[in-house]
Amino acid sequence: MKSSLTQRLGPLTINLDRQRFAAESLGELLSDQQVRRMQAMVSGQFTGKAVNPSEGRTANHWALRAAAAPAAYSLFAHACQIDIDEATSVKTRLEAFADEVRNGQYRTPQGETYTHIVHIGIGGSDLGPQLLDDVFTHLKLEGQHPHLSIAFLSNVDYHEVQERLARLDPTRTLVTIVSKSFTTRETLLNAGHVRRWLREAGTEFEEAALVGITCKPDKAIEFGIDRQRVFEFSEKVGGRFSLWGPVSASIRMKFGNAVFNQFLEGAALVDEHVALSPVADSLPAWLAICDYYNLQQGIESLMLSPYDSRLGLLVPYLQQLWMESLGKGVTNEGKLLGTPGCPALWGDVGTNGQHAFFQMLHQSALECAVELLAVVCPAHDDQPSHQILLSHFLAQAEAFYNGRLNTDEQRNNPEINYRTCPGKRPVHVLMLDRLSPYSLGCLLATWEHRTTLLAAIQDINPFDQWGVELGKTIAEQIEPCWTQLSAIPKDPVTRHLLALMKHQQCGE
Ligand SMILES: O=P(O)(O)OC[C@H]1O[C@H](O)[C@H](O)[C@@H](O)[C@@H]1O
């Protein structure tokens, strides 16, 4: 066997032996120019260069972790000391407030402790904290507050609002309104619903309960949030890279600062590794190079299956990071990209996926890469069942690549070819020693660097999302058409559909 493409970083191990290329050094798969762009992306982030050219911004989400692990950064981040200081100062304020909520110093107007948090936000202001809440709750961490629960409100769907609020007591609920822009329609609408619900219990509850997390503190104050409880983060932190900072305030409150800071330290380990490794040799770079190579082979789909139920929300979280960052149509120079900027990312936990969509990946003509993630040491003591789970994990990794009955002769033999599995699916194997705040931080920061490096290889901007604007603008134009007779949708199909809906709703 050729030398193994295995790399280990802290609690994370990757293996890339099952790929379609033969190169022993992944850097060989790239041009010098691509490697230079990767270098510029890495050093640009850590030295405050405008790596987000379409918005003329730096990207300093990593400074949020530097606030928890300063030593690691002192080696390379002098140029961004101001960003680190800013992140540290808001972290200190937030830590103090989270402690006050946890230890009952910050109380309801009736002098009781808070028992619920409603976290309102969407996209980057929701997916990360939801993932953290889910994983950390499963981990049964010592720091977890015994009585504090979090309910997330993201969608603009009143069914959800009703259902979530019905289970909560407005006199003992704290509300974190999380929005980088503080203009997002869904978030402000839900915040309005929740504010009314609090007000019905008494205006004093509304005044005490609201906490704002945003880059636009003036807007949060204008909304009615006390300045003391507005926690600001930098405009240079992209929404989908923002879970490391005040966006996760509710997580600090429920699980404690020590737990959250371990999560940041896990991410800081990856930053240090990426910054100090030869650029094409870092662990995230290996993954990004495989992703790029596969795209060039026409493999435009990536199925991710974590073999651990506690990671059930990982895929939705990564879908935003990956596809909002890399789903671009042009390069930084405005040239059309010939391929998608990333494979479409989807998947579900193993072994569940094996009994649903794996069949299609084993036998159909769909070109798909496969990423399987295992947690080697479980948090329970039923070793035999974990060994069965890991056996399935290892078996699928083998089956996707080796296939079955896949010689030309077998494939063309109708007597047996219904059993043919072509194999040669590129397989990325990822293993975490165990699941912890630290290892999760390490995993998510790995994906962030993988994302920005894949962007650099292709010369695309991973930090903007202009496509998202289009639907928002059209929705703004459609909204008044429900109530104003003079407002009519411009598009004839929308006009037709709206008329049908109105008819069905009111029998017009
Ligand atoms: O945090 P907000 O400003 O409310 O934005 C929430 C989300 O809005 C948009 O959908 C963007 O595409 C996302 O990147 C962002 O995370």
Image (cartoon, grey):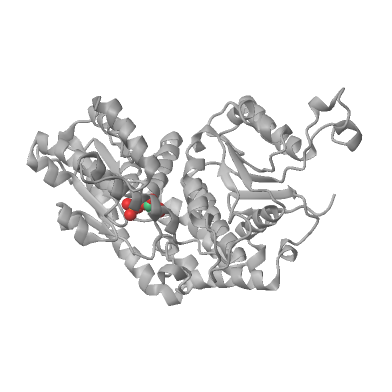
Q: Residue at x 24, y 31 (%)?
A: 165
- In the visual, does 285 lie left or right of 76? right
Image quadrant assignment for residue 117: top left
Closer to us: 236 or 494? 494
Q: Compared with residue 354, is residue 456 higher up or lower down, i.e. above or below? A: below
Q: Residue at x 53, y 54 (%)?
A: 327
Q: Compared with residue 45, is residue 215 higher up or lower down, i.e. above or below? A: above
Image quadrant assignment for residue 290: bottom right
Tell which residue pokes out farthest to the bottom in this image. Answer: 79
Q: Residue at x 37, y 41 (%)?
A: 494
Closer to us: 44 or 500? 500
- For residue 102, say whether it is visible: no
Q: Residue at x 67, y 63 (%)?
A: 281
What percent of the width, then of the height, locates residue 486?
A: 21, 45
Quarter containing the C terminus: top left
What percent of the width, then of the height, locates residue 402?
A: 80, 38
Image quadrant assignment for residue 114: top left
- In the visual, does 386 lie left or right of 3? left
- For residue 19, say whether it is visible: yes
What percent of the width, then of the height, locates residue 468?
A: 41, 53
Tell which residue pokes out farthest to the right in this image. Answer: 409
- In the visual, does 349 lie left or right of 69? right
What percent of the width, then of the height, locates residue 430?
A: 63, 45
- In the visual, does 343 lie left or right of 76? right
